[in-house]
Amino acid sequence: MQEPISIRAISSISALGPTTQEVWNSYLSKSAFFQKPNAGKWVSKITLETERILEQLQQDNHSYKNLDRTTLLAILSTRNLFAKGALPKKNLGINIGSSRGATQLFEKYYSDFQQGKKISAFTSPTTTLGNISSWVAQDIAVDGVTIDHSVTCS
């Protein structure tokens, strides 16, 4: 290869925690992070602290109020990478894989459609898979490529 490509950092947001250290501590705890809420189906929910951080993210930037939860989680996860100070924003690309894309808003808009309600102008731009990486790239102001890919069958 003439131009090397490398993975320099990784981040996630999950029920195990919103930071690398919390995720590691969760793995060491040997606990299962599943619960059966009211509906009786097993789920693995993100922490209350992560929920609070997501709400704050939406309040801090008016443009984020119409974004799907998946996009907000991706923004938060990416911000965690830069909080460590290990990554430069120059010559940096974003590659985000998702099995479903921005589904929470899609489900809401589809429900509105089924009920005969007026459909939001935000339906298409906020529910596409490409919307995730483009918002992440905009949030951290990268100058490189932004890529989304489906990981549904992988």
Image: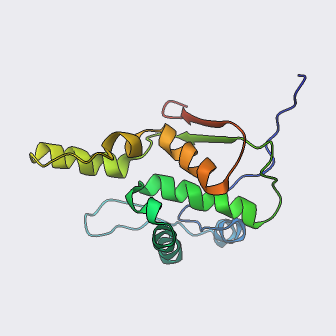
**Camera-side residue: 119 or 113?**
119
Q: Is residue 33 visible?
A: yes
User: Horizontal placement of 112 versus 107: left or right?
Assistant: left
Q: Relative to 69, is 48 above or below?
A: below
Residue 87 appears in which quarter of the rendering? bottom right
Residue 62 appears in which quarter of the rendering? bottom left
Q: Residue furthest left?
A: 116
Residue 43 at x, y percent in the picture: 40, 61
Residue 142 at x, y percent in the picture: 70, 48
Q: Residue furthest right?
A: 2
**Camera-side residue: 21 or 84?**
84
Residue 17 at x, y percent in the picture: 59, 68
Residue 93 appears in which quarter of the rendering? top right
Give the quarter of the figure containing the C terminus: top right
Q: Residue at x 26, y 51 (%)?
A: 108
Q: Residue at x 72, y 59 (%)?
A: 81
Query: Tell me, what colour scheme is on the image?
Result: rainbow
Q: How many marks?
A: 0
Q: Relative to 64, is 108 above or below?
A: above
